[in-house]
Image (cartoon, grey):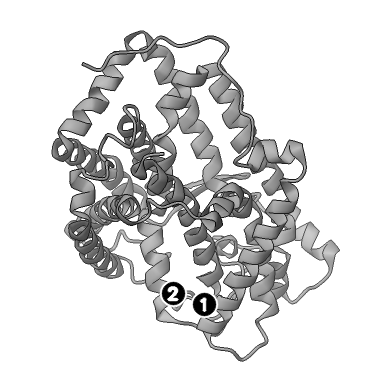
Amino acid sequence: MPRASVGIDNLRAVVIVMVLAFHAMTAYIAFIPQQPFAFDAPPFLWHAFPIVDQQRWLGFDLFCGWLDVFLMSFFYMLSGLFVWSSLTRKGPAAFLQDRLLRLGLPFAAVVMLLMPLTFYPSYVQSSGDTTIAGYWRTWLALPLWPSGPVWFLWLLILWDVLAAGVYLLAHRHGNHVLRLSFYARQQPAIFLGGLLLGSALAYIPLALLFGPANWFQAGPFEFQLSRPIHYVLYFFAGALIGACGIERGLFAPDGPLVRRWAHWLVAAVVLFFAWGGLTAMTMPDPWGDTSAAPLPLRLAAALSYVLACFSSCFFVFAAAVRFGGARARLLDSLKANAFGMYLVHYLFVVWLQFALLGLALPALVKAAIVFSVMLALSWSATAALRLVPAVANVIGADRHPAARPAPTRALPVE
């Protein structure tokens, strides 16, 4: 496998570990209130911060803030890299069948079965009531059904449906798609400039209209109101990059993105702190109303998010190809189990954070305990689940996805 492909493949597992670390730290970040969030009253922020510990460390705020800036857009772009080749290989019907099995079934299982078990400690901490009956009555009375960390899967299914529709409309002229991908490979500066402009147009109006921190919630379906168009743009940008093959395109080991990885690092750091400063000026309360801030300041804060997200996404891609192109048995095992670990880890995170509440340990020590124990439990649980063939076919790397019913004609790019 080419180095670029190995680097991106390894990255798919590494970013899952980053998400697991993010959730292990959320009880110990400094900016959340000292008291736990009310379980039965809006805005129901306990489903983002289920446990509130008195031990805090500012370093966790920086790490979690950085991930919040770029990680979801990055996830959608990473998934989009493989969409066009998958559609070409399988066809839209088999592609959607596979995605519904791979994403829809785990989403439903985690939301319906694991999330009620996961949030019980949050209810106990906020209310002091330990009865199962009281918890269940309160849970059923909620105006939403919390989906936890898997909330993004239903949007990814929606983007896959859109991609299949685009394929149906464009497959007779698929060479145009490949030519666009080839152009992005030949003219990376123009492509990246267009993506940056498009992401600004996609994000800034919604951020000014709804604010950067407000969410839509209906049952288990939720998303940040300022970001859905931004997300889908990154998804289809990834599809365009990957249409000609990631090892030869923008992410080539000898390409301009990888050669300038240090420049992307500097840009990512500078723009992240610019975003943090401007956001703090417009929104002193992390969940407050930004409408009182002057419009130019709100506009600058929204633009800083676009720039910080863009620079961090492409820094991570560049660093992965530059430094992550080696095979390792530990990484191979992690890749095989990463998706299942993502699905089950939150249950362990919340209960471990709850168990450590009464211990007088520094926040750094508590987070390290939660992360290491959760990682071991999630990895072991997923490996055990994958011993069941039906489960392995959904969450494992050795699964057998649906095949295309008929072969596809190769399309020229030049």
Q: Can residue 202 be seen in this view?
A: yes
Determine whether the residue tagged by mark 2 lies in a helix, strand or loop.
Answer: helix
Figure check: 349 above or below 199: below
Tell me which amino acid carries mark 2: Phe
**In the shown orientation, is residue 319 left or right of residue 390?**
left
Q: Position of residue 103 (x, y in %)?
A: 59, 37
| Mark 1 vs 2, N-terminal side | 1
Q: On the rendered image, what quadrant is the C terminus found in?
A: top left
Q: Residue 291 versus residue 168: which sits nearer the camera?
A: 168
Which numbered dot is residue 28?
A: 1
What residue sits 49% from the left and 10% below the top? 407
**Mark 1 in CB contact with mark 2 (< 8 angstroms):** yes
Q: How crowded is mark 1: few (under 14 residues within 10 Å), some or many (20 or more)?
A: many
What residue sits 21% from the left and 32% below the top? 184
Q: Quadrant of the rendered structure where residue 294 is? A: bottom left
Figure check: 182 above or below 335: above
Figure check: 233 above or below 289: above
The residue to which callout 2 is attached is: 60
Tell me which amino acid carries mark 1: Tyr
Q: Residues within 10 Å of mark 2 (few under 14, many from 20)?
A: many
Q: Residue 148 versus residue 239: which sits nearer the camera?
A: 239
